[in-house]
Structure formats: structure tokens, C-alpha cells
Amino acid sequence: MKHSAKLFAAASFLMYSGFCCAQTEKDTVYVFLNDMPDAGIYLPPPPEMTSPQYADDFAQWQWGKTIRPTDRGQQANDESQWGIKAMVKIHSGTLGFEISKEKTPAIYKLLYNVLWTENESTHNAKRKYMRTRPFAQYNEHTWGRFDNERELRFNGSYPSGHTSLGWSTALVLAEMVPELQDTLLRTGFQYGESRVIVGAHYQSDVDAGYLCGTTAVAVMHASEYFQKDLEAARKEYCKIKGIKSVSKTEGFPDGTKVFDGPVTEESHRFYGDVIKYYETLPERETERGEQAKIDADNSIEALLKNFSIPAGRELSAEATPAIAALLSYTRENMVKTAAELGSSTFRERPYVRLNPRRNKTLISDDEDAKKETTSYPSTSAEIGWGLALMLVEIMPRETANDILNRGFEYGRSRIIAGYNYPTDVQTGRLWASATLAHLHTMPEFQTLLQAAKDELNPPAKGKKKKK
């Protein structure tokens, strides 16, 4: 009997993870599991229930239950569905037509392949941690009508697979149709948030799921099959809409329409932000604190040096001029988008709000200059995670985990230094992926990207470079 139960558990896990025969077909994934960055390596483990960091997870779980009786709760209930049917349902309205295998074969194929590819991004971490889901932890039921509780109990909660699917799909469609980017990204963001509301995931599971989705999209961009399918889907969209091409002149996404805004002191999440801030203070006296000081310099020269170690090669204007130009251009645009989102609201920085008598950070000579700037979103977190994603797209796959970990820790340095709250840092990382989705539609960026790729892998003599 016990043996049968174990077999059922294993089968349930493999089925839910999408690890079945269909996934091994050549046209269903752009990147296979062995080539996908491992979230069990580049991300930290989920908070233990005895950890102070669990306070935010617990508060969000309680908040989610209060939302269930509302329209937003019903939306979360409906969004508990996973898979291609769910993506077709939530995005058809935004695109303005029914997505189906018969009516829109190119768009359907793109979504289907993105789904199975991103599904690989959470696989290793789920198996590594096998975190118990909140509904199971507290002996309750999920609010999601599509959730199979029996299967979910044998499928790790961290990271959230639903969230990875929703955010990665939104990023790809935002790149396909830039003029709809705000709505598409908002839909993807809420799809992840819904998992907290229904009680199927903790907030930290969802936060990790968003980041898994961003890494999946980064590595997909290195696939020529993904590029071809994306272009075919874009052409199909234009044909249906009766237009020659999608707009290439639209500006970057409007973050105020994508995210919920900064955590306020009246929010139940402020307590979690404060706890996580104070928990990092002892790290200031360690080697990690010294690294946080180094990370305070986000000049392009410092960033190139910072990422040289995980990349396994010297990155500099002299040694890799094309890569330096690509990252410099990316950094400039991320500074711009962070400023645009930050201008919509002001959040006092933690070292000002929480240390009113001392107002101390790790970098004291920078305190006065930063005091009047907003903590939300973290510009450094956006730059660090964004450049990591760019490098993952072009560098050898064996460097991906180290590069992503460095990008993640680059943002965490801002918490350790006292400049940003954890939720500001997380928003910065997500904003990086949204910024990159739009950058990929810009001709100047594409030119720089191709030059960086050619620098790493020069075309054979007599062979034309890709346009």
C-alpha cells in the first residue's frame, strides 16, 4: 500500500510539472531542463516558518483570505486554471480576438511553447525544497476552483509555477505587441498575485515565480526557434488587425498601470519590510557588508567588473567593447524607467524612516544626496537583475546560475546598505524584465545585441552576419 502511494505521488508530481512525453517533442520547448537556469541555485531558499522573514508570508496569506469574497477574489478563483487554456482565456480579451489553435495557429503555438519552456524554470527548485503549500500547512482548502488539492500536496510550493507562466507569457506578448504592454503585463502580474489570494502559494513563492519567469524568457531569446515563432505570431496579429506592422515607437510600459504601488505604512506588508530590513543589519559587519559597499557603485565600469567573475571572463570597454556598449545602453534605459516609475510616488528610504536619530547607511558620504530620492522602485535592483538577464541571454549557459545569483544579490545589497525595502527591490527586478521586453523591440538595441553576440561568437569568414 505504501509503495502504491509513493508511485501515485511521483506520478502526480511529474504530471503537474509538465514532465511528460509531450514535453520532449522538438516543437514544444525552446530550452530543455538541462539548459535552464536552476532556481534552486541562483535564488535563496524559501523562508522557514520559524524565520522572521515568514512574517510577510503569513500576513499576505491572511490578506488573501479577506479578498476572496470580492470581485478580485472571484478573479483569483478563475485564474487558478493552469496551462494553455488559461493563457488563451486571460489574453484573448486584451488582444481583441479569440486565440485558438485553429484561428490563430502562430500565436497559439508561441504561447504553447513558452508555457512548456517556462515550466522547466521552476522544476529543480520545487523538487529541492518541496515546500508545503499554505492551504495544506494550515489544514484548509484552496479558493481556486481549478486547483486539484491532492496533486498540489505532492508539488512544491516554491517557486510558483502559475506565476512563472503568467509573467513569462505576459513579457513575450508585450514584446509581440508593444502598444498593449501595460494591460498584458498587468494581467501577468495579477495572475501571480491570485495564487496568494486562493491560498495555493505564499508571497515568497510568487516572488520567486516572477523571477523564474524572467529567466525563462531571457534564455528563450537565445533560441532561433523562439525568435521565428515570435515574429510569425506578430505577423499573424497584424494580419488579423489589418495593419502593416505593430507600433515600434511606443514608449516603455507605465509601471503605475502594471504594479500595485509601494507598500505604505498603513499596509499589512510594511511590518514584513521592516523585519527584513532589520534582519540584514548584522550583515553590515561581515564580508557581505563589504560587498554591499562595492555594489553601491552602479557605474557601467563598476558593473562590468562586478559581473566579470560570474561570467568567467573580463568584461570591459577594452576587452569586450560590444558587450560593454550593450550593457551601457541597457543600464541607461533602466535608470530612465526606474526614474519614471519612481516619479509617480515618493517612499521614504528605510535608513531615513527607521533610523531617524542616526540616519546611517553603509555609504555615509551618499546619505544626504539619497535622502530626498524615493525608495520605490530600487534603481540598483533593476539594473543588477536587468544586466544579469541580458548576460544570460548571450553568455554560455554554464555561467547562468552564477550571473543570476550575482544579479539577485546586487539588489539585496540595497537592503543591507539601508537604501531600499525588500518590496522596492523586488519591484525593481520585475521592472527590469518589463523594460527588457520593450528594449527587444527597439532597432538600436537589436543592433547592439547582435554585435555583442558576434563578439562572443564571431561569424565564420565569408558567412554573413544576421541582421
Image: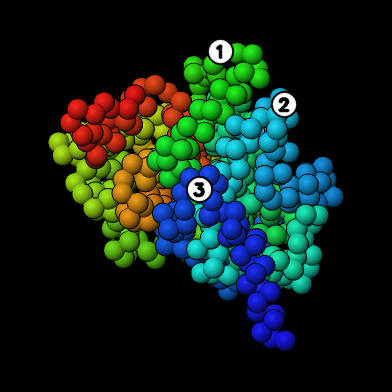
Q: Mark 3 or mark 1: which comes first in sequence? A: 3
Q: Can you name the residue that lies furthest to the right here?
A: 69
Between residues 199 and 350, which one lies in front from this camera angle?
Answer: 199
Between residues 29 and 68, which one lies in front from this camera angle?
Answer: 29
**Residue 365 placement (x, y as % from top left):** 29, 44
| One can see residue 12 in this view | yes
What amino acid type is highlighted by mark number 2? Phe
Q: Mark 2 or mark 1: which comes first in sequence? A: 2
Helix, strand or loop for disc 1:
loop
Q: Which residue is mark 3?
A: 26
What amino acid type is highlighted by mark number 1? Lys
Estimate the spatial distance between the alpha carbons at disc 2 and disc 1, rounded to whole Å.
Answer: 18 Å
Q: In the picture, residue 151 is in which quadrant?
A: bottom right
Helix, strand or loop for disc 2:
loop
**Residue 236 placement (x, y as % from top left):** 60, 24
Q: Mark 3 or mark 2: which comes first in sequence? A: 3
Check if mark 3's residue and mark 2's residue have beta carbons within 8 Å.
no
Between residues 345 and 204, which one lies in front from this camera angle?
Answer: 204
Q: Which residue is mark 2?
A: 97
Marks counted in the figure total: 3
Query: Which residue is rendered at x = 78% and y = 68% of the image?
Result: 140
Query: Which residue is rendered at x = 34% and y = 24% of the image?
Result: 467
Check if mark 3's residue and mark 1's residue have beta carbons within 8 Å.
no
Task: Name above or below for residue 9 compared with residue 399.
Answer: below
**In this rendering, the label closer to the viewer, 3 or 2:** 3
Point out which mark residue 244 bears.
Answer: 1
Helix, strand or loop for disc 3:
loop
How would you rate the neighbour count of disc 1 (Cα within 10 Å): few for under 14, some for 14-19, many for 20 or more?
Answer: few
**Left or right relative to 303: residue 133:** right
| One can see residue 421 in this view | no
Query: Which residue is rendered at x = 65% and y = 62% of the image?
Result: 15
